[in-house]
Amino acid sequence: MVYSLAASTLTLAAPVGCDTSSAEGVEPTAAEAHGPSRVLVTGADEEMLVLEVTAANKVVLRLPRVEVGQGITTAVAMMIAEELDARLVDVDIPLAEARTKGNQYTGGSSSVRSLYGPARALAATARARLVTAAARRWHLPARSLRTRDTMVVAPDGRTATFGSLTAAAARIHRPDVSSRPKPASEHKVIGRPTGRIDARDIVTGKAKYAGDLEVAGAKPTVVARPPTLGGHLVSVDDRAARAMPGVHAVAKVAGGVAVVAESFHHAFKARDALRITWRPGPLASLSDAAIRTRLRAAVPSVGAPPRGSAQVEGEFEFAFVSHAPMEVLTAVADVRADRAEIWFSSQTPMDARESIASAIGLPKSKVRVHVVRGGGSFGRRLNYDAAIEAALISKAARRPVKLMWSRGDDIRHGRMRGASHHRIRASHARGRVVAFSHAMASVSESYERQGLTAQGGVAVRGGVTTVAAGPLPSDSGLYNFGRVSESSGSVELAMPLGAWRSVDSGTMRTAEEIVVDEVAAELGKDPVAFRRGTLRNKAVKAVLDKVAAAGDWGRPLPSGQAQGVAVHEEYGSCVACLVEIDATDPKNPRVTKVVMAADVGTAVNPRGLEAQLMGTAVDGISTVLRAGLHIDRGAVREGSFADFRYARQQHAPLRFEAHIMPSRHEPGGAGELGVPAAAGAVANAYARATRTKPRRFPINF
């Protein structure tokens, strides 16, 4: 259901169940600015999409999601182009600013799934009204007209662009043709591998990120931060910094001391000239070994195994991991006495708006949040630490600021994936698994519930607490493993944690897939054959069969080289991954080949999905073999890509294949899907190549 604004252009909006001329929370459109509007139909779609056809023949859809490199703008543009029969080049997908209602959450591999129906329905309705407008202009039956290339075509060859029809279409209440979306059998755009609509802008520098914005008066800003997590400012001598050329302001903030200057060069120089005394954070006596000990102690018991069964057991450790998006956190803020504007990349702009308003003491109706594209996220931009901090600095300095967290700032003080410890036991009898138990403990984010500092960081309430065990959502139901039990415990640390791509599955499934391989070896079975015989889902078996065939599973390899395989099912989708590794030098292993197969239902853009899978393969390579964070006496040791060793080009597979399984089902999730399978396959390949049982990740840590 949609409503139309009767104005100089056709503007459709997903409804909010109201009977006023514009929906609360949806920003004013160009159409509204030109004249009165009228609601024609209302409904209750929380996506609140706004689609406009302009007189210049552009189709504009204001997207309530953020583009962080995952390609959602391209996927949605393809949905719109499909239903409108528009040229993809004529479709623009600007990002909607923070609203007061609706769904603006970007995460959980949910964007394509949640937008697929509403976006197509909106575009199909727009097409029906445009066709009706042309039919009435030409005095022809609407059913005799066709659409292509962003125009309506008559049987005699006459054409009219959508832009030339938009004003008339905006006045149509009931179209003369169906407004139902096309069946999948008629798709010409959806399902076709397509390059990103913003690719040229990205490579030429036309695409704008927060750091590229020119906001009047906004000056480069950086913050001096404590050496330990949760450290506090005791005193600062800023006389030398204030006297340096190009420095506009120095201000104390919750996270440290901010410097506002004429350029980032001036700002960093002045920051380094500050003489600061810090009080150590509450974890200053805590390092990796102690954290691992506490995590191990917090893992619940797996209970007694079934009588008469033999056991395959393993304990697994996973380190903290930084998100480390290529674009560092940046936010522009202009806070005045009676209003505020903030520009940054956010996966949760509505929550951010509310938190920013609270932090600076303004009603949220006086705070405007502009959502900007981001250069990577992997869950990092679910949090808005930098935006709150920028707003507070702007308020304190009484001027607009452009705050940038350096790479070291984000790695040492930003969000990270929590460390975890897993204990798994597979019980087998008579050649099959009869019970499977997985107990784990992770560093908990529960401190967040105790409150946040003004900068969105940790409100420290003390040291370390062990949280009681509880049930854990079962992933191992993927296999027919008899009685499956899972439980969890946690250790609460005053650390800035955050959702990292694939969240819990990235560690849980990795550990479980390692145990599946070890069970197969114990039973004398091939890992692929064993999985085929125990997997519950036919779709998972199909992707496993695909990678086994495409990757030539079982082919002879030299000593020190091996294959590994793993599968995963989540978000209504499934994936399998086959890896080949050269671990002739176990300290410097190299993944040489990755083959992945995924069933995600309808793949709107197979090329985009292939890119997502490639990214998850690199994530698996990185977190299993190389990349993690150490904690040394309450401080993060790593501070750049020089020591946070994410995979570089020299570590990427020499050969990568992605196979997208055909499907007519609704889209499932894809962005996070591949990480657990890739990580599990890399770990299993390394184990087979080195004839070891890896238990601590990353392996070379």
Image (spheres, rainbow, N blue to C red):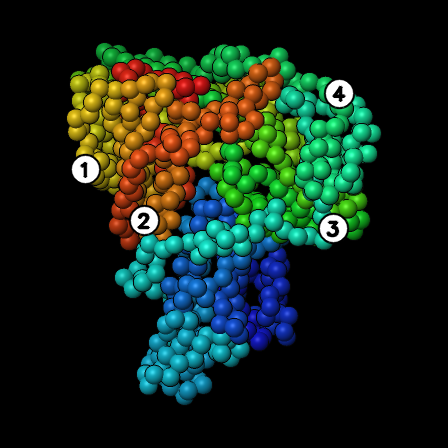
Rounded to the nearest angstrom, the CA distance separating label 4 from label 3 is 31 Å
| Residue nearest the observer in this picture, 689 or 158 | 689
From where the camera sits, is residue 294 visible? Answer: no
Secondary structure beneath label 4: strand
Question: Mark 1 — residue?
Answer: 549
Asked if residue 82 lies left or right of residue 407, the reply is left
Q: Earlier in the sequence, mark 4 or mark 3?
A: 3
Judged by depth in the image, the label closer to the viewer, 2 or 1, is 1
Q: Earlier in the sequence, mark 4 or mark 2?
A: 4
**Label 4 amino acid?**
Thr
**Label 2 amino acid?**
Gly
Q: Residues within 10 Å of mark 1 (few under 14, many from 20)?
A: few
Q: Which mark is residue 601?
A: 2
Secondary structure beneath label 2: loop
Q: Residues within 10 Å of mark 2 (few under 14, many from 20)?
A: many
**Label 1 amino acid?**
Ala
Asked if residue 647 lies left or right of residue 457, the reply is left
Question: Mark 3 — residue?
Answer: 217
- Report if the CB atoms under discs 3 and 1 are less than 8 Å apart: no
